[in-house]
Image (tube, rainbow, N blue to C red):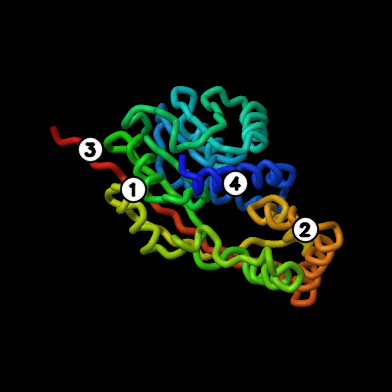
Amino acid sequence: MSSQKEEMLTRAKTVFNAASDYFDAPALSFWNRYGQQTIDQLSLRPGAQVLDVCCGSGASAIPAAIRVGPTGHIMGVDLAESLLELARQKSQAKGLKNIEFRCGDFENLGLPDGCFDAVVCVFGIFFVPDMEAAVQELWRMVRPGGKLAITSWGEKVFEPANQAFWEVLAAERPDLAKTVTPWERIRHSDTLQALLEAGGATQVQVLSHIGSHKLTAAEDWWTMVLGGGLRGIVNQLNSAEWEQVRQANLDFLQSNQIQALEVDVLYAIAEKIRNLT
């Protein structure tokens, strides 16, 4: 494993293990919404075998398990054991016996070619440095006639709160201010489609969804910060900086009377051509 990949995976694991305490908070209901919508694109049949990588706490894996029924099987894979434990608890509470969760790197599962009817990756493909190689690996495990679903963020991701967060952070801790977010490499329909095709995927279609996420209170935004990828940033702040950044974020939302955030999501679906022989 390259040092760059090892560093990125270690960072993602650390961030999302830390974020697990807020990951399933009501303010982060979008995980379940976009996970469900990803599965809805696949038209899974009873008995289907599904791999869900970067599965988090089961936002797409659990709906998939319900869809395929007791004769089907779901394998969820993630780096963050804390999120996987949440997923196990939720699936057990629903009485699902057709789902398992494994901790590991999805690029090194060692599974045979064409062993799944569908492979799913929701908001995770951008965490690997070589996304093309990652797509190739996922596509390899899709059987003929099966589908690959990759969901990613579009141009607007919880705006204007997200931009305000980075502006406040730059004023308080310029050393932590971003240069680029991982998903910006594939934030347009054409670049996401090109990625899948470069990874060997066929019959690729990308659906762009422009929507919003409602806030019940300004504090919801800070809960979202703590329950997502920004947790890795705020955890580097001391207590005074933390409170300064938090309060400035809340002040911005309250003074501008922001009750909903703009969010764009891209759903890419590829279908593997069946063998004609």
- What SS does tag 1 mark? strand
Q: Amino acid at mark 3?
A: Arg
Q: Is label 3 or label 4 in front?
A: 4
Q: Residues within 10 Å of mark 4 (few under 14, many from 20)?
A: some
| For the residues bearing labels 3 and 1, Cβ distance under 8 angstroms | no
Q: Are marks 3 and 2 in contact (CB under 8 Å)?
A: no
Q: Nearer the viewer, residue 215 or 180?
A: 180
In the rendered image, the quadrant that contains the C terminus is: top left
Q: Earlier in the sequence, mark 3 or mark 2?
A: 2
Q: Residue furthest front?
A: 3
User: In the figure, residue 21 lies in which quadrant?
Assistant: top right
In percent of width and height, residue 187 lies at 46, 63
Q: Which residue is mark 1?
A: 270
Q: Position of residue 120 (x, y in %)?
A: 45, 42
Q: Residue at x 75, y 59 (%)?
A: 222
Tag 3: Cα neighbours inside 10 Å, few (<14), some, or many (≥20)? Answer: few
Is any atom of residue 159 visible in this view?
Answer: yes
Q: Earlier in the sequence, mark 3 or mark 4?
A: 4
Residue behind mark 2? 237
Distance from the alpha carbon under mark 3 to that under mark 2? 52 Å
- Image quadrant of residue 208? bottom left
| Coordinates of residue 15 in the picture (x, y in percent) | 66, 47
Q: Amino acid at mark 2?
A: Leu
- Measuring 54% from the left and 51% from the top, which residue is drawn there? 34
Mark 2 or mark 1, earlier in chain: 2
Query: Is label 2 or label 1 in front?
Result: 2
What number is the disc on residue 12?
Answer: 4
Q: Can residue 122 be spotted in the picture?
A: no
> The disc labelled 4 sits on which kind of residue?
Ala
**Relative depth, front residue between 53 and 147:** 53
The outermost residue toward the bottom is 256
